[in-house]
Amino acid sequence: MTEQELIDKLRLEIIQQLNLEDQKPEDIDPDAPLFGEGLGLDSIDALEIMVLLEKNYGIKIEDPKEGKKIFFSLRTLAQFILEKQQA
Amino acid sequence: MTEAKISAYCHIAPGKVMLNGQLVQEENTTVFAEFIRLVYKAAGMSYPKFYKMDDLCKLALVAAEQLLKDNQFLERHPKENIGLIVQNASATYDTDATYQASIDDRANYFPSPAVFVYTLPNIMLGEICIKHKIFGENALLISPAFDAAALAQHLDLLMESGRITACISGWVEQKNEHYEAFLFLAEKTEGNANAAEHTLNAETLDILFKKHV
Amino acid sequence: MGTRVFITGTGIFSSIGRGVDETLASMVNGKTGIAPIRILETVHRDFPVAEIPFTDAELLALTGLSKDLPLTRTTLIAYIALKEALASAGIQQTGDERTGFISATTVGGMDKKETFYPEAATSQEWLKYIDTQDVAAHTEALADLFGFRGFITTASTACSSGANALMLGARMIKQGLLDRVVAGGNECLTRFHLNGFNSLMILDKEPCKPFDQHRAGITLGEGAGYLVLESEEMVRKEGKKVLCELTGYGNSCEAFHPTASSPDGVGAYLAMQEALKIAGLQPADIDYINAHGTGTDSNDISEGMAIQRLFGEHVPPVSSTKPFTGHTTSAAGSIEAILCTLALQEGLLFPNLNWKTQMTDLNFAPVTKLTKQALKHVMSNSFGFGGNNTSIILSKY
């Protein structure tokens, strides 16, 4: 899977996992911050993304603080997943 | 008793929204998930967090919006003196079941933190406070049915002590497809020109509660 | 101003003891109730907890109640604590209209539900417990067992529930609506909330260390605490001995986030400020704060900041007793109020166990050794999810 394909897949998964009902997938800027501004996600959303990573990608993050760095943007998240999958 | 007036009240029941005793919205669907989204949209709300909430919180938030959207209630009182006092019967029964389901399947074990957060009935008060930046006293009291006398007494206690000068209060209940909300705004009078005619007491609350369609 | 509110009786049951005497002994001897899981049937054994070291069958035997009654673990624990509270206040009659009962729980009958679920629909045995699912059912069951017939209600505001029960009781007495209120909270451990807190990643794999720079979360506990609140007139009329006075209380909403506390602790600040106002006290009058101090990143910085802001130059000795009892959630407010009554009576500052490293963002450190000190006014904080923050003040009489 290419980075772009994964980004597109993640768009849909995140909208579903985080109940972002009014959000159109194509409107999520892959380089915009997921937390704070951008999508404005919070600490619970970060935990839900960790659940998503485990459920859909078999990747387990033990420390929530580690998560915050990985989840900077959709692109960094996709890159993290691809790295883990290649390892 | 401290003089306080009910300045607005609303009911939400399957398929219907009433404000101050008048039907303001009626939908063909009574299915909660569909209905509540129609009420959210009709109220012109744009609050993405709404979709993350469980049904009980969605109901409470939308009912509060009916009361707050077209008046200056929030501007008339210091935010630390607006109380949120609500009665409820089933706590968060449905959300509890949803959460339980997410931990039951050992083969598919993915507990959801977002669901767990909502397994506390007082979170609905917290969500209203977060949206409207209200810092006053919050209380969630469990009661098998709406108890006007107990609620009036509780509100009087708070108003009399000066802890609150106004409140958003009432009854918000949701379990399976049974849902109903009766929320009202009450304000201490004392020359408050905006107060409506209903005095806050047990009899009035009972009458207004029963005014749902 | 209203009538004064006195504490005339207390009853407590937690991992550190059954009853006030055992509890005090544990506190004085630095004996924690935190240990690996022994009673709760769960696959999650990574987290220590503060369990009451009795099985449900053993608890039932302690109560002497019939095994045919639908009694959940929460009710059994509460029963034992309530019995002690009433006995300690010398109360025999509870059925009059001027006596109230306010109980707080969140978990309610969850322990039985999770035992039977998902076969519940077809389980005959479950039918016996079906009414215990309701949170209010616990209050009603206890009211029935003890003969309360006046004002009865159930508060359910997460971890501030126990303190809110006390606050409501005090208010009703102050305003002359009731002469006496038995108030408190109760909660048993369940897989439901152990999993839940774990999903929020706020459980510590080691015993909690509140206010420590390297704190890593909560240690859950279970228990019940009930206090008997009586009006000035009742105390005088019946010649009651007084343990202490409930002089102040405050509740506010933080309006920040459903589960995290604000970095500057505005909710905690407002609640503590309100409690001082009701008590007619200045920050410098407080001799000890029993903090909410759960050991999470969020609470301890939030509460710490609020304490610094409110108390300025006069931050009194502060400690969290959760490293002793665990975080007993709905019971915490009342269990910790009882610990405060002991602190007042014995003139003791209880230590904040497990603390090693100063938090870099705070300019105070908690009390780490049991210290003899005469106390006049103590403050107890309980903050719940949903931003429900409560602070109460107890004073020496």
Image (tube, coloured by chain):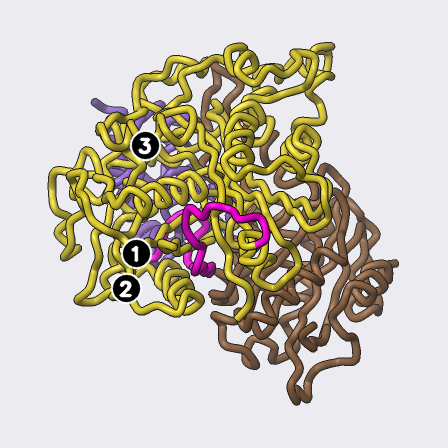
Cβ–Cβ below 8 Å for labels 1 and 2?
yes
Q: Point out residue C347 in the picture as x, y percentages from the top left corner.
A: 25, 45
According to the image, label 1 marks what residue? C376
Q: Amino acid at mark 1?
A: Lys
Q: Return the mark for residue C24.
A: 3
Crowd band around label 3 with a 10 angstrom C-alpha radius: few (<14), some (14–19), many (20+): some
Q: Point out residue B184 in the picture as x, y percentages from the top left corner.
A: 70, 66
Cβ–Cβ below 8 Å for labels 1 and 3?
no
- Badge 3 marks a residue whose secondary structure is helix
Q: Amino acid at mark 3?
A: Leu
- Shown in yellow, the chain is C
Q: Point out residue B20 in the picture as x, y percentages from the top left corner.
A: 79, 71
* Magenta span of residues: C237-262
What colour do you see for chain A? purple
Q: Return the mark for residue C285.
A: 2
Front residue (pair C128, A30): C128
Whether B8 is drawn above or below C289: the answer is below
Instruction: Tell whether position C163 is magenta.
Output: no
